[in-house]
Amino acid sequence: MNKVLVTGANGYLGAQVCRHLSQQGYAVSGLCYPSIPDDKQWQQPFAELLVGDVRDTATLGSIAKNGYDTIVHLVSLDHHQSNGDPAFVASVNITPTWTLLDTFSKNGLRKFIYFSTIHVYGKNIEGAVTEEHAVNCNNAYALTHYLSENICRYYADNSEVECVVARLSNSYGQPVFANNNCWWLVVNDLCRSAWTDKKIVLQSNGSPLRDFIYGKDVCQAVQILIEKGLNKNVYHISSGSTYTILELAQKVQQVYRKRTGVEIPITSANASTPTVSKPYNMVNDKLKALGFAPAYDLEAGIANVFDYLKNIFSDQLTATGDQ
Ligand SMILES: NC(=O)c1ccc[n+]([C@@H]2O[C@H](COP(=O)([O-])OP(=O)(O)OC[C@H]3O[C@@H](n4cnc5c(N)ncnc54)[C@H](O)[C@@H]3O)[C@@H](O)[C@H]2O)c1
């Protein structure tokens, strides 16, 4: 059986990926930080739950002795946090990639899946963007991910470990844990304001384009990369379709209307912002060639986020008579 260690196991994507891989029969070990979430149902299928700081080399050294076939590395500070003190940011976003590969490669590791971001391409992308597109990091978050990608490349060239880089677009969907760091993600944010405020307020004129991918489709992609991802390769995890933020807001509005009969307004807090995105799409043909087929369109994914919000905010909604 494939023994998989997932770092960031209690995070937004990590918690979903762990659940998915366990359901698919993997022996999943989850490395959580700063503690293991107190949820027996989520904990139950794990082969092992561990707590540890990825900055702590002694902890990683002792965990490595358990012997893992595969690591899925999902630890990073987010965009905002990555603008902090470079030494601290590097200690979380970059050095652990190196330490994990150094330590675990000496303990039988066969495959390392590194989660990066499409932000490595920078802002001025247009047309069909493949994994061969020039990298142009223009923020610290992207830079640290790209530096980690290069560490992976080094180990792919100089060790027995197969390294696969996943450049993820914008994921969305209901979290496993209410405190997951996910409500700033644009689809989740618009759904939440639609549900709780009965309006959608855009922070731009609605023209920026984004590729959105539902969490369960990300999980499917991770499994495919574990089973079939090729050494030294970079893969986009994306839906392959782009929407403007206004189109997204209209989708949210439409799904909300379908289930409640209520038309909520869409307004813009910054209607005069200039148009920034040129048309582009995040080509995912490489992943599709391995068998990836996104199962959730935006409408289905948004409906699931609303189902989640309905449960979370049921008291409030009863009070406002919107159920
Ligand atoms: N969510 C997205 O849409 C998206 C898009 C592109 C790339 N990514 C990348 O995917 C990965 C996972 O993202 P996410 O959305 O689940 O983020 P997240 O913030 O929810 O998860 C990060 C995890 O890292 C853990 N962590 C932070 N510092 C740690 C430390 N010192 N030691 C051990 N663990 C530590 C956190 O506890 C958390 O479990 C990240 O690398 C992120 O940059 C995410």
Image: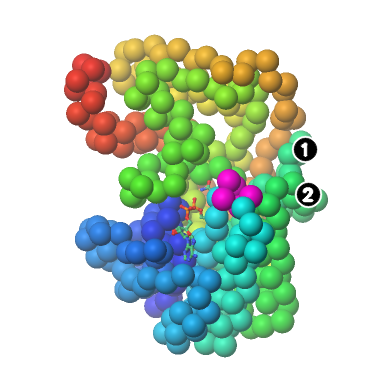
Residue 129 highlighted magenta (yes or no): no
* Image coords of residue 17 (percent x, y): 42, 58
Quarter of the rendering containing residue 276: top right
Q: Residue furthest front?
A: 85
Between the residue at mark 2 and the residue at mark 1, the CA separation in whole angstroms equals 9 Å
Q: In this picture, is 264 found above or below 308? A: above
Camera-side residue of 5 and 69: 5
Residue 81 highlighted magenta (yes or no): yes
Label 2 CB less than 8 angstroms from ligand 1: no
Density class for disc 1 (Cα within 10 Å; few <14, some 14-19, many ≥20) is: few
* Residue numbers of the magenta segment: 79-83
Label 1 CB less than 8 angstroms from ligand 1: no
Q: Which mark is residue 226?
A: none
Tell me the SS state at disc 2: loop
Say whether residue 70 is left or right of residue 46. Answer: right
Q: Main secondary structure of the magenta part?
A: helix
Number of on-image labels: 2
Quarter of the rendering containing residue 164: bottom right
Tell me the SS state at disc 1: loop
Q: Residue at x 59, y 77 (%)?
A: 99
Amino acid bearing label 1: Asn
* Image coords of residue 292 (percent x, y): 53, 52
Camera-side residue of 288 and 299: 299
* Image coords of residue 132 (percent x, y): 77, 53
| Residues at circles 2 and 1 in contact by the CB criterion of under 8 Å | yes
Q: Is residue 240 visible?
A: yes
- Label 2 sits on residue: 136
Q: Residue at x 78, y 49 (%)?
A: 136
Which quarter of the image is occupied by the N terminus? bottom left
- Label 1 sits on residue: 124
Say whether residue 316 is left or right of residue 212. Answer: left
Q: Is residue 117 visible?
A: no
